[in-house]
């Protein structure tokens, strides 16, 4: 099947041809005709399948006739992050170049004045994050009563980020006769409930089993201690054929520290996380896309918002807290039929998270290296955030006598006495120098020992 076979306009076909696209992906072939027939749809598709174009392309043709009125957008696309919103806007500019449709982008992190001016001129397509949209609505700067079409993109991510109440609120302010398109990688119960409430007799489209990982991506788990993560990452970056890669961390502070460490060791890296303003984020993304940097250290703000061709590797420096995030993180590679590799670092505290990931994707991930005990003085980092209850007086690690003693000449002896001895280190499989294989005969790594593993294990 070709795009010319599914009833798109000549102007749209011309733009697609210039962009180098001739045949639709499965999600596009299934969704576009339904959107053209003005049906509500629920589309389940994993990341990297071309789902953005599956609603952008028919929307351009549907909205081609009609006139926008001041502060009353004709269509609304809701995105969970600024990056995804900007990506959709790029798609409209690329494919709608021969149509005279106006567009506005409402996202946080940028000045509101220009956004309000665009709305007052009237827009055919409004692309927004829920927070900024509600902010402008409550200020009386936008009316939603003229909206003919609503797209809720990345609905499961909206759920993770706590946006579902906002979306429900937005839906109540839109005309009941609108067309609604809902896209999601998974269909958890709250999303099903949302669809049942706000969609009318929707067409259900599923092109892949929910939360499946792309078969073009080779996946590996790398056993490592917390203190050896940076060493192992650097060795992997040097030994793997990495053209460009995204390194995901769970915390913003880890992103900053790891990026600084990589730069100190001579790598061309940049960073993106929630504390960076929109202009700086865009600058880092452009540098990554242009090849000025080939490593992007990121928090999960980038897991679903990046669409960069040719990403060869993804490294989960921290195992993700949520299994769904694993699928979206590694989905940054292996896009558009290309091959990719994904390495996830696993410490003792990550085992529960890894079990959840393997259960979600339905298969075991190849594991490299023997699970290593933490080094002396190293604290296990849990896979999930756990709020600890305050210790009682009887279990306080430092008594009043101990605290007072730190100021006296006997403080050193008392500290040594007060601090418990660390648990003995677990025995590691030692590499056989003559054969290059591990000599342990249990469940450890029993093949040739890759060079990067010697950084964190054995040698």
Image: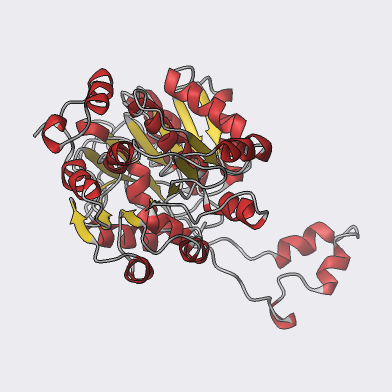
Above or below, comparing residue 220 to residue 325 in the picture: above
Identify the image's colour scheme: rainbow, by chain, secondary structure or one colour: secondary structure
Q: Residue 426 versus residue 245: which sits nearer the camera? A: 245
> As drawn, is 64 to the left or to the right of 126?
left
Q: Is residue 49 visible?
A: yes
Residue 129 in the image, given as x and y percentages of width and height: 52, 49
Figure check: 316 above or below 130: above
Residue plotted at (86% across, 65% down): 405
- Check the picture and name the quadrant holding the N terminus: top left
Compared with residue 423, is residue 58 higher up or lower down, i.e. above or below? above
**In the displayed image of the protein, which residue is found farthest to the left?**
1
Tell me how many marks there are.
0
Q: Which quadrant would residue 195 be assigned to in this image?
A: bottom left
Q: Nearer the viewer, residue 414 or 316?
A: 316
Q: In screen coordinates, is 52 left or right of 175?
A: left
Q: Residue 240: image x %, image y %?
A: 32, 26
Judge whether residue 339 can be spotted in this image.
no
Residue 13, horizontal then vertical, whole percent: 22, 26
Q: Quadrant of residue 124?
A: top left
Q: Nearer the viewer, residue 201 or 247?
A: 201
Indicate the position of residue 10 as horizontal and vertical percent values.
21, 25
17 or 259, which is in the foreground?
Answer: 17
Instruction: Specify the quadrant that holds the C terminus.
Output: top left
């Amino acid at each position: 099947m070709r795009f010319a076979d599914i009833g798109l306009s000549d102007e749209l076909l011309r733009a697609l041809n210039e962009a180098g696209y001739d045949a639709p992906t499965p999600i596009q072939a299934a969704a576009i005709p339904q959107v053209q027939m003005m049906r509500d749809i629920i589309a389940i598709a994993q990341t990297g399948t071309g789902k953005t174009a599956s609603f952008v392309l028919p929307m351009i043709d549907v909205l081609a006739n009609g006139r926008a009125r001041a502060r009353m957008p004709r269509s609304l696309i809701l995105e969970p992050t600024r990056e995804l919103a900007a990506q959709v806007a790029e798609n409209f500019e690329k494919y709608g170049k021969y149509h005279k449709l106006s567009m506005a982008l409402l996202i946080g992190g940028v000045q509101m004045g220009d956004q309000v001016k665009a709305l007052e001129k009237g827009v055919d397509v409004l692309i927004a994050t829920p927070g900024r949209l509600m902010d402008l609505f409550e200020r009386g700067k936008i009316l939603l009563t003229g909206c003919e079409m609503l797209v809720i993109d990345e609905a499961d991510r909206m759920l993770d980020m706590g946006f579902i109440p906002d979306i429900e609120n937005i839906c109540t302010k839109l005309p009941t006769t609108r067309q609604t398109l809902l896209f999601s990688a998974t269909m958890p119960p709250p999303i099903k409930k949302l669809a049942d409430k706000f969609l009318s007799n929707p067409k259900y489209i599923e092109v892949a089993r929910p939360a499946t990982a792309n078969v073009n991506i080779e996946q590996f788990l790398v056993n490592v201690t917390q203190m050896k993560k940076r060493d192992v990452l650097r060795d992997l970056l040097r030994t793997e054929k990495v053209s460009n890669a995204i390194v995901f961390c769970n915390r913003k502070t880890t992103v900053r520290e790891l990026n600084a460490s990589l730069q100190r060791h001579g790598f061309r890296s940049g960073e993106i996380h929630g504390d960076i303003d929109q202009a700086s984020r865009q600058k880092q993304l452009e540098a990554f896309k242009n090849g000025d940097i080939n490593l992007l250290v990121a928090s999960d703000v980038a897991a679903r918002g990046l669409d960069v061709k040719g990403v060869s590797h993804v490294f989960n420096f921290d195992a993700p807290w949520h299994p769904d995030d694993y699928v979206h993180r590694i989905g940054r590679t292996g896009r558009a039929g290309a091959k990719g590799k994904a390495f996830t670092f696993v410490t003792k505290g990550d085992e529960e998270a890894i079990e959840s990931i393997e259960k979600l994707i339905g298969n075991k991930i190849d594991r490299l290296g023997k699970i290593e005990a933490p080094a002396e003085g190293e604290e296990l980092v849990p896979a999930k955030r756990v709020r600890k209850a305050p210790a009682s007086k009887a279990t306080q690690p430092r008594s009043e006598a101990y605290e007072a003693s730190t100021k006296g000449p006997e403080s050193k002896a008392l500290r040594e006495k007060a601090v418990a001895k660390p648990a003995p280190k677990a025995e590691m499989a030692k590499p056989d120098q003559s054969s290059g294989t591990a000599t342990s005969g249990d469940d450890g790594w029993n093949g040739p020992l890759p060079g990067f593993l010697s950084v964190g294990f054995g040698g």
